């Protein structure tokens, strides 16, 4: 009987509690709190706690696609985004629900939900420096986004020599 609904639609079991996220965004346009679309970001450990030595790494690659629905994303083409020394491309979930256009100069950052080698930032989302000539915002996007930047690892089976 676990999880079945009663006649009035209420569950017999109390709802599961979800760990609170440290930061939620406030949307000025809709005057309410917006939950982050990418749960894997807030569920990841802090990068500094992982003990890795890759504060900058120019060979990090987009990894770990995650499905999102109805979110604003930035589509980056031809390595038009820079984060910690890596120039990357792909679709990234935007952390600022009120962002309506990309900054004109690449110096102003765009906050996105993307981990670095499996860890998240201490103070909220990662901030990418984005070349506006190589990127665009897409509102109400449904599909897959990149959720992690890390070192490309070749599968052992791909390393076999073909004679």
Image: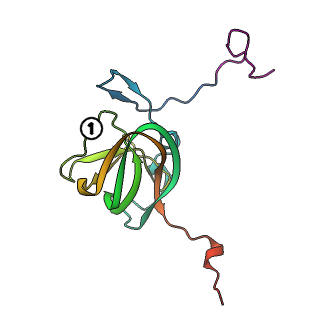
Residue 53 place in picture, x, y as percent: 43, 62
Nearest the eye: 134 or 34: 134
What span is in magenta?
1-15
Q: Image quarter for residue 93?
A: top left
Circle 1 — which element?
A: loop
Identify the residue shown where x is 25% and y is 56%: 131
Residue 107 place in picture, x, y as percent: 20, 52
Q: Which residue is mark 1?
A: 100
Find the residue positioned furthest to the bottom.
Answer: 163
Per the image, is 2 magenta? yes
Q: Image quarter for residue 141?
A: top left
Identify the residue shown where x is 18% and y is 49%: 104
Residue 84 appearing in the image: no
Q: Is residue 153 left or right of residue 96?
A: right
Identify the residue shown where x is 53% and y is 44%: 67
Residue 157 place in picture, x, y as percent: 66, 74
Identify the residue shown where x is 73% and y is 9%: 7
Q: Is residue 14 left or right of residue 149?
A: right
Q: Give the answer, above or below, for where 146 lies relative to 59.
A: above
Nearest the eye: 21 or 8: 8
Q: Is residue 142 left or right of residue 28?
A: right
């Amino acid at each position: 009987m676990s999880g079945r609904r009663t006649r009035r639609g209420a569950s017999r079991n109390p709802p599961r509690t979800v760990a609170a996220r440290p930061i939620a965004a406030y949307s000025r346009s809709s005057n309410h709190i917006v939950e982050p679309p990418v749960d894997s970001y807030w569920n990841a450990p802090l990068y500094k706690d992982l003990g890795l030595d890759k504060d900058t790494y120019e060979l990090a690659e987009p990894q770990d696609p995650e499905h999102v629905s109805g979110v604003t994303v930035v589509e980056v083409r031809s390595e038009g985004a820079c984060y910690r020394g890596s120039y990357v491309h792909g679709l990234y979930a935007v952390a600022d629900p009120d962002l309506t256009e990309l900054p004109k100069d690449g110096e102003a950052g765009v906050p996105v939900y993307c981990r670095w080698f499996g860890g998240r930032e201490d103070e909220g989302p990662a901030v990418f420096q984005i070349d506006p000539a190589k990127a665009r915002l897409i509102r109400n996007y449904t599909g897959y986004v990149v959720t992690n930047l890390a070192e490309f690892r070749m599968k052992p089976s791909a390393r076999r020599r073909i004679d």
